[in-house]
Image: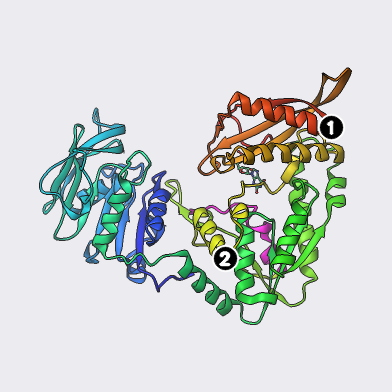
Amino acid sequence: MDQTSHDRLLIIDFGSQVTQLIARRLRELNVYCEIHPYQNVTDAFLADFAPKAVIFSGGPASVIDEDSPRPPESVFDLGVPILGICYGQQVMMHMLGGKVERGHGTAEFGRAYVEPQNDPTDLLFGWFLGGREQVWMSHGDHVSEIAPGFEVYGTSPNAPFAITADLDRRFYAVQFHPEVHHTPNGKTFYENFVRIAGFKGDWTMGAYKEEAIQKIRDQVGDKQVICGLSGGVDSSVTAVLLHEAIGDQLTCVFVDHGLLRLNEAEEVVTMFRDHYNMKLIHADESDLFLGELEGVSDPETKRKIIGKLFIDVFQKYAGEIEGADFLAQGTLYPDVIESVSFSGGPSVTIKSHHNVGGLPEKMGLKLVEPLRELFKDEVRALGHELGLPASFIGRHPFPGPGLAIRCPGEITRDKLDILRKADAVYIDQIRKHELYDEIWQAFVAILPVRTVGVMGDGRTYDYACALRAVTSVDGMTADYYPFTHDFLGETATRIINEVPGINRVTYDITSKPPGTIEWE
Ligand code: XMP
């Protein structure tokens, strides 16, 4: 989708692990930006994109190497402000006539403190109020001579050119990463940069909603759209946005595989069918899924069975919707950002569960992806604009295969019932103690083991379960949540008292890595 109505900032990606954070910082400042791998940024691309400012990201390469990544020379003739970060700084210096040396003995990783030099520039408004600023360094090579026209505005003990700028041309180059959490005043730094570039801060979710609705109408015309609704935040926001745009031309298909949480199917149906008045097909296929899963213990086999059945079922129901031309998906920006690959060309990473397994091509459907430009927190903000309840928008992620991967070993209806009840008590405890929003994801796994217990005067022989709760930013890494012993004790007591079938509760204190968040 083209965002020509907004001022645009271009981030040229040289492969840094934290490039997405730059984009997120800018979006938080209501600035529309896009990340593009350096390989794609040609003269023609620049002319077409017409950025109001450019940022060069960091990256793992060395500018001293002959074939190391570069932006096109023409970027320096655009007449717009440019900010180079880390590798971006080195590339800028190298191309504009400075010198970069290998980092023998001067490599620097971690916290550093920058002190001001020269009269402060507009870029550093609000900086150095406490004398020095903490920043995050992560570099091997270093600039040994700055390019003509540049002055030094900040130094650290190991980085004499920590902050440099050519104020006339509005080129800025810094050795550290202002986008990371460990540069606490980084937000002010970006605020200054976008103010210098003249951004109006017009990227707001209110404005986005109106534009997105208009674009959906233009794209879809009077045709019918199918949307797979899981009840998760992305698909829910997609569905509500589409419904606002095209009303009854939208039909949602909610595949109920029998592996959902307590009351989840009813809640989804009530909210979307009754509250929003959407055309919603509740495809209750739990018998089919649970039947096929009978006797299966291997985690990968479970996933494969569920994935295949899901597509079959979705296709069956979608096929019954007459005249559908479009399939709506909640694809997000992080799923479509092309990542820089140094071994080959740029590669697109799309999570397989978003792209309902090649269905669009198979069914001859065109895609509508109204969240393609948004980060997760922006999707939540959009959900808020659309009037989705806060409790819904802030929900923890829930995996496509559902409770199947929280039930190691064989899946039975009995075990699923026990798991649902235990999970509901656990989440209730977390909400009561107001911990829900601090936790990325929390759930119960029912273990394929029975243990002996004693309740009242009797011996019990019931299932053990494991509680899981983690904090995380993106699900790629995670830490277990440090509940108090009181909380854990109270929760264990409630589960054992309220959930027949469980007589032992454990707490999983494994981080990711080495564990995964789910048990399978
Ligand atoms: P793991 O267990 O790999 O999970 O640490 C990371 C995040 O991904 C979710 N997850 C899935 N989501 N389909 C999904 O839609 C899946 O097959 C799947 N497997 C894991 C998991 O809940 C966590 O948020």
Q: Position of residue 187 (x, y in %)?
A: 33, 49
Q: Which residues are magenta?
A: 347-363
Work out which residue is located at the far bottom of the displayed protein and give it: 222
Residue at label 1? 500
Q: Position of residue 74 (x, y in %)?
A: 25, 64
Earlier sequence position, callout 2 versus callout 1: 2
Residue at label 2? 386
SS for dot 1:
loop
Q: Is residue 72 visible?
A: no
Gap between marks 2 and 1, in whole Å?
Answer: 40 Å
- The question of residue 359 being in magenta is answered with yes
Question: Which of the two residues, 189 or 52, is positioned nearer the viewer here?
Answer: 189
Q: Residue 3 vs residue 477: left or right?
A: left
Q: Residue 495 vs residue 161: left or right?
A: right
Q: Residue 518 vs residue 308: left or right?
A: left
- Where 384 falls versus 48 (above or below)? above
Point out which mark residue 324 bears.
none
Tell me which image quadrant ligand 1 sits in. top right
The amino acid beneath tag 2 is Leu
Q: Position of residue 201 (x, y in %)?
A: 35, 64
Q: Residues within 10 Å of mark 1 (few under 14, many from 20)?
A: some
Which quadrant of the rendered structure holds the C terminus? top right
Q: Is residue 316 visible?
A: yes
Question: Residue drawn 79% across and 65% down?
Answer: 317
